[in-house]
Image (spheres, rainbow, N blue to C red):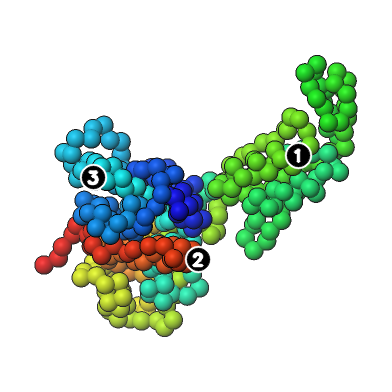
Amino acid sequence: MIVRDITNYIEKLAPLQYAEDFDNVGLLVGNYNAQVTGVLVTLDTLEATVNEAIAKKCNLIVSFHPIIFGGLKKLNGNSYVERVVLKAIKNDIAIYATHTALDNSKNGVSAKICEVLGLTNTKVLIPKKGIIKKLTTYVPSNDAKKLRDSLFNAGAGNIGNYDQCSFNIKGDGTFRGNENSKPVLGEKGKLHTEKETQVSITFESQHENAILKALQKAHPYEEIAYEITTTENVHQNIGMGMLGELEQEMSEKEFLLFLKREMKTDCVRHSELLNKKIKKIAVLGGAGSFAIPNAKKAGADAYVSADFKYHEFFKAEKSILLADIGHYESEQFTKNLLVDYLTKKFSNFAIILSEKSTNPIYYI
C-alpha cells in the first residue's frame, strides 16, 4: 500500500477539482510513492497530532484542514505550522488535506451534519459552477459510435439521473496533409472531404485527463480536432451546504436544544426567536455566514453553521433562525466520515481515528 492508493480513493469521494480556488488541498507533505504503515484521520494537524501518529505507527495523516494554507517562506520552527511540517518531515510522515474538496462533495461535511441531525429529502444548498465541461470533436461517421462508447467509459456523458448523453451532427469535414503527414483517410498533399460526425459531450472536470486519453486512443485521425470549454451550468450534486427536513417539526427552543445535544456543543449562538415552527433546515460546516442569503432564498426555517459575526445576525431579518454552533463543532464528525469511508475499502489496514481534540476554543 502506498500513499497514492489511499489518496486516489479519497479523491473519488472528494476530487481535488471540487476545492475552492483559495484553498490548499492534496498531499501537502510527503511522497505519493511512500509505503504506508498506517493512516491517522484528524480534523487538524497539530504537533500533538504528529506525536499521536508516531506513537500509533501511522506515517500518513489524513486531515480535513490544511496545515499549510498560505505560502511558507521559512522553515525554522518559529510558528506552529513550521513546527508541524518540520516534525512530519523528520519522522517521514505524509500529510494530506481535503478541506473544501470535501465541503463541496454531496457526501461530505454538510451531508454528515444532515445525517447526525436525521434530516431527510436532502439536496445541495449552493450548487457549484465551473465543474461541468464540454468536449466537442469531429470524427468519421463510421467511427462515431466507437468514440462515444470510449468517452462514456471514461466518465463523460453523465447528466443527473442519465448517462451516455451526447449530441451529434453529421456534416462534411475537409483537410489536406502536408509532406510529413500520414493521413488515415485520403492522400497527403490532396484536399480530402470526409463524412464526419460532430460529437458534443459534457463531463465533470475531474474526468478530463481520462477523457482526453480515451479521445486519443479511440479517435482514428493522426491529428484530432477538438475543443474543451467550461460551462456556466451548476452541478446539482456538487456544492456547499445542504438543505433538508426534520422528521417532525419543532418549536425554536426545542430545535436549539436538540441541535446543542446532537452536535455535542457547549454553546449555540442564535438570532432572535420568531415564535415559528422549525422544519426545513439549511446546514453548512465551518465558516458559513456567506450562505445566509442562500438559506433564506431556499425557504429554510433555520440555518446552522459557524463563525457568524455580530452584524451578520441582523441578516436574519425576522425571516429565519440563525444558529452558530461553533467551527470545530460543525465539522467534528468529518473525521468519522473519512474513517468509515476508508475502512470500507481498506478493511485489513490500520485506519485510525485521532483521539485528540484539536478545538482551540474553550468555554467557561
Give SS at disc 1. Answer: loop
Which residue is the extreme one toward the top? 179
The answer to whether the residue labelled 3 contacts the one labelled 2, judged by CB atoms less than 8 Å apart, is no
Give SS at disc 2. Answer: strand
Can you identify the residue that label 3 sits on?
Answer: 87
Work out whether residue 39 or residue 251 is closer to the camera in this orientation and state it: 39
The residue type indicated by label 1 comes to His
Label 1 crowd (10 A; few <14 / some 14-19 / many >=20): many
The answer to whether the residue labelled 1 contacts the one labelled 3, judged by CB atoms less than 8 Å apart, is no
The answer to whether one can see residue 244 in this image is: yes
Identify whether 313 is placed above or below 229: below
**Splitting the image into 4 quarters, where does residue 225 fall?**
top right
The residue located at (64%, 63%) in the rendering is 161
The residue located at (30%, 39%) in the rendering is 70
Report the mark closest to the observer, 2 or 1: 1
Can you identify the residue that label 2 sits on?
Answer: 123
Work out whether residue 9 or residue 299 is closer to the camera in this orientation and state it: 9
Cα–Cα span, label 3 and label 2: 41 Å
Can you identify the residue that label 1 sits on?
Answer: 219
Give x and y (percent) for residue 51. 22, 54
Mark number displayed over residue 202 = none
The residue type indicated by label 2 comes to Lys
The residue type indicated by label 3 comes to Lys
- Mark closer to the chain start, 3 or 2: 3
Give x and y (percent) for residue 91. 27, 46
